[in-house]
Amino acid sequence: MAVVREFTLPDLGEGLTEAEVVRWLVDVGDVVAVDQPVVEVETAKAMVEVPCPYGGVVTARFGEEGTELPVGAPLLTVAVGDPAHSDLAPASPAHPAATESAEAEGSGNVLVGYGTQAPAARRRRVRPEAAGSRTNPGPVGRAPAPPPPTASQTPSQTGASAAAAVAVISPLVRRLAREHGVDLRQVRGTGPDGLILRADVEGAARVLEERAENAARPAPHAAPRTHAMRTAVAETGAERIPLRGVRGAVAEKLSRSRREIPDATCWVDADATELMAARRAMNAGGGEKVSLLALLARICTAALAKYPELNATVDTEAREIVRLPGVHLGFAAQTERGLVVPVVRDAHTRDAVGLSLEMARLTEAARTGTLAPAQLTGGTFTLNNYGVFGVDGSTPILNHPEAAMLGVGRIVPKPWVHDGELAVRQVVQLSFTFDHRVCDGGTAGGFLRYVADCVEQPAVLLRSL
């Protein structure tokens, strides 16, 4: 006798709490094998295929393409067992017990690329009575906006809320609530069984911020201006683009960086003529080619060995600077999906050829959208080559929570005083942005000067090899 099993969007790891359905790989009525990919989703980190741990007949799908689903939301139901029986009909979402009527064996394998949870241990579900009553949403779409926390709640009401279990399973959501001063006991979750999602906390935080702004506003001058702005938007037919996926993740990370990190930038022009000549000599002998970006990456790892203060992060809660033992070097890559920063693990252990090969591999994966989230997180330092866009300089925003970033402009012929005479040389502008909490200007200047010296005289790098 067949059993209908419900497969939910698994925990994607790396603090990710939702994903957008990009493309369904199966239809209702299709037969799927254990661990067969059934849907392609896009997270804030990458595009991944999600495998189903059950084998059987697909009886229902939840979420149209383009729908954003929270972790734990139903993806599809699968009839596991004899397909000849009548109970293979799609299970009604209003009766979730139909999918729980018996235990069927799943693979327990993890999400393709970085793993899933084993189905043996079930997470205790928070009862709807404790998390706030809500009806079953049926096929999952985008979660409705959470109601704002009301200031009219009485002490008895908040006490009752405190007694109830807070339906939060994500450490990221708890930390976000802490940072914005949101009381999770007063937030009603919009996820499955009242689960509190990141969007719920962000909505509550916006309400608190608006209240604080309204209380601090001395005069009601902003209202007519806001009305005029909305009228102008309506008249011009401006396009509204949701900040989600990669664009949303970038916006959130850059905003947090500017909000939390007191950064400073210094820059210097360098004569890259000798570095370009050294690269030509390296590649003239055959074998694997060394890219210019890989040479700059090798210079960065040598500079970080000399100035380890900059391979660090700041633990704001503990009020500590955390110096990191290894260099995981991120580098900016522009793709059709937007700007992504793949990370070369243990870059300090690789030579120029090894860095070149790994950066080429990650760049290709970024362009094809096959990078796993683990390959886009955990960086300790970022190298940003904005010279490919034809610009000379920039003041980049730090890749939170990293403490430093080196920016490289275009290399172009310019007049330069060389050996006491005016000459045309290949000149590049190097800019260095750093977290002023981890070091003072002398350390940052020393780092940048060492990088510039290696660019101008690559033989300087030999001292660290």
Image (tube, rainbow, N blue to C red):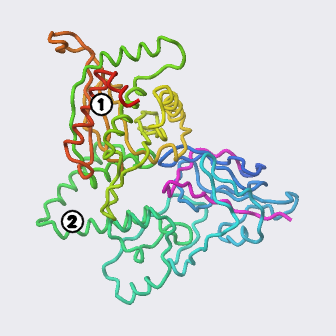
Q: Nearer the viewer, mark 2 or mark 1?
A: 1
In this rendering, is residue 166 above or below 70? below
Quadrant of the image containing the C terminus: top left
- The earlier-in-sequence mark between 2 and 1 is 2
Residue 203 drawn at (x, y percent): 37, 64
In this rendering, is residue 219 above or below 130? above
User: What residue sits 22% from the left and 10% below the top?
Assistant: 424
| Residue type highlighted by circle 1 | Val
Residue 88 drawn at (x, y percent): 80, 61
In this rendering, is residue 339 above or below 129? above
Looking at the picture, tell me which residue is in the foreground, 290 or 192.
Answer: 290
Number of residues whose C-alpha sits closer than 10 Å to that of mark 2, classed few (under 14), some (14–19) or many (20 or more): few
User: What residue sits 24% from the left and 23% below the top?
Assistant: 270
- Which numbered disc covers residue 103? none
Tag 1, which secondary structure? helix
- Assess whether residue 25 is covered by the magenta stretch: yes
Number of residues whose C-alpha sits closer than 10 Å to that of mark 1, classed few (under 14), some (14–19) or many (20 or more): many
- Assess whether residue 359 is covered by the magenta stretch: no
Residue range of the region highlighted in magenta in the rendering: 1-27
In which quadrant of the rendered view does residue 448 lie?
Answer: top left
Residue 430 drawn at (x, y percent): 26, 30
| Residue type highlighted by circle 2 | Glu
Q: Whole-Å distance between the Cαs marked 2 and 1?
A: 45 Å
Residue 428 placement, left or right of 67: left
Q: Residue furthest bottom?
A: 156
- Residue where numbered disc 2 is placed: 213
- Residue where numbered disc 1 is placed: 451
